Image (spheres, rainbow, N blue to C red):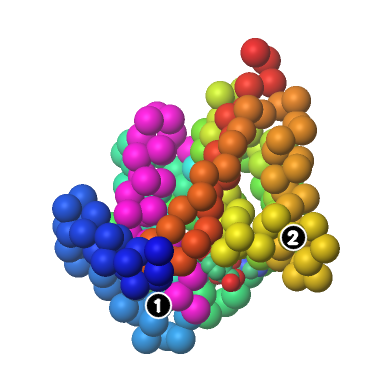
């Protein structure tokens, strides 16, 4: 299997299940035009996030890592009218592009973007009594994933869903001796998920237009 085959099949799936959408298409276009890295989830991964939020019946969502707001828009579309999504982004340029895309999507009243390093803004949220969130999507700097999991637990409740992107990293995740801080962050994160008494979790490998990677899914079941 090659990247080219994955792309062709991803296009087949996207053509079937993700019809052109001017808001989402424009979010990707403005992100690329502003020089943002192409690290957004793919269209069918975005739709998976929306479906998971719908299955979850999520009314409140926390996202760590906004980029240009592409995954933010997918997730926010799953919310009811009185729902709320908090998204955390450290880079001012990314935040500005995202705010414009979120406004264009008609989601400015539903989405709140906090600018700052997530390890600074997460304690602020907790101090403000925000949460618990019904769904938390972790998709920022991977070396901090272990800390993000601890915060996700603090800001969730039994029944919350915690999802993380990029937990396979082209297969590098199996290399215990890797000197890549992102690989080590993801390895530690996966171990925390696997060993936490607070969640029931697994990891699914993915291939497609974003290469070979994976999603982690964890259900907060502490009171089970
Ligand atoms: N969720 C987005 C992609 C996010 S890419 C999507 O699928 O569309 C990762 C983002 O995390 C980048 O925008 C990067 O600037 C941001 N980021 C990196 N380190 C961060 C930190 N410490 N705190 C908050 N955001 C951070
Ligand atoms: C990177 C980050 C992501 O969230 C992603 O989906 C792909 C790549 C990165 O930092 O390389
Ligand atoms: Mg990602």
Number of marks in the rendered image: 2
Is any atom of residue 86 visible in this view? Answer: no
Q: Is residue 134 left or right of residue 147?
A: left
* Crowd around label 1: few <14 · some 14–19 · many ≥20 (10 Å): many
Q: Which label sits on residue 175?
A: 2
Residue 35 versus residue 161 in the image, above or below:
below
Q: Nearer the viewer, residue 214 or 97?
A: 214
Q: Is residue 142 left or right of residue 209?
A: right
- Secondary structure under the numbered disc 2 in the rendered image: loop
Relative image position of residue 40 (x, y in whole percent): 44, 66
Query: What numbered label is drawn on residue 137?
Result: none
Label 1 secondary element: helix
* 191 is higher (above) or lower (below) than 214: above
Q: Which residues are magenta?
A: 37-60
Q: Is residue 16 left or right of residue 50?
A: left
Which numbered disc, 1 or 2, marks the residue closer to the eye? 2
Q: Which residue is mark 1?
A: 31
Q: Quadrant of residue 203?
A: top right
Identified at 62% across, 40% down, the residue is 130
Q: Position of residue 224 (x, y in %)?
A: 65, 13
User: Where's residue 68, x and y in %?
Assistant: 44, 70
Instruction: Give the image location of residue 132, x and y in percent.
Output: 60, 33
Depth check: 187 or 198 in front?
Answer: 187
Q: Is residue 7 visible?
A: yes
Q: Quadrant of ligand 2?
A: bottom right
Q: Is residue 218 left or right of residue 39?
A: right
Tell me the crowding category of disc 2: few under 14, some 14 to 19, or many 20 or more residues within 10 angstroms, Cα based: few
**Considering depth in this image, is 223 or 62 the residue closer to the camera?**
223
Residue in the picture at 34% in, 72% down: 4
Q: Residue at x 45, y 43 (%)?
A: 84
């Amino acid at each position: 299997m090659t990247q080219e085959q994955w792309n062709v099949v991803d296009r087949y799936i996207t053509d079937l299940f993700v019809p052109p959408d001017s808001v989402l298409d424009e979010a990707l276009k403005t992100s690329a035009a502003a020089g943002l890295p192409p690290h957004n989830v793919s269209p069918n991964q975005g739709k998976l996030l929306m479906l998971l939020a719908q299955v979850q019946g999520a009314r409140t969502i926390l996202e760590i890592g906004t980029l240009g707001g592409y995954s933010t828009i997918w997730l926010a579309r799953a919310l009811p009218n009185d729902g709320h999504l908090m998204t955390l982004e450290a880079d001012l340029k990314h935040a500005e592009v995202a705010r414009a895309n979120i406004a264009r999507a008609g989601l400015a009243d539903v989405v709140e973007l906090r600018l700052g390093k997530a390890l600074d803004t997460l304690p602020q949220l907790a101090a403000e009594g925000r949460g618990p969130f019904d769904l938390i999507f972790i998709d920022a700097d991977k070396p901090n994933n272990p800390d993000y999991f601890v915060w996700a637990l603090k800001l969730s409740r039994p029944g919350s869903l915690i999802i993380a992107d990029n937990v396979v990293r082209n297969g590098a995740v199996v290399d215990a001796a890797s000197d890549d801080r992102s690989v080590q962050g993801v390895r530690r994160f996966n171990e925390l998920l696997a060993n936490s008494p607070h969640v029931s979790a697994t990891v699914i490998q993915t291939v497609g237009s974003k290469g070979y990677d994976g999603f982690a899914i964890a259900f907060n079941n502490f009171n089970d």
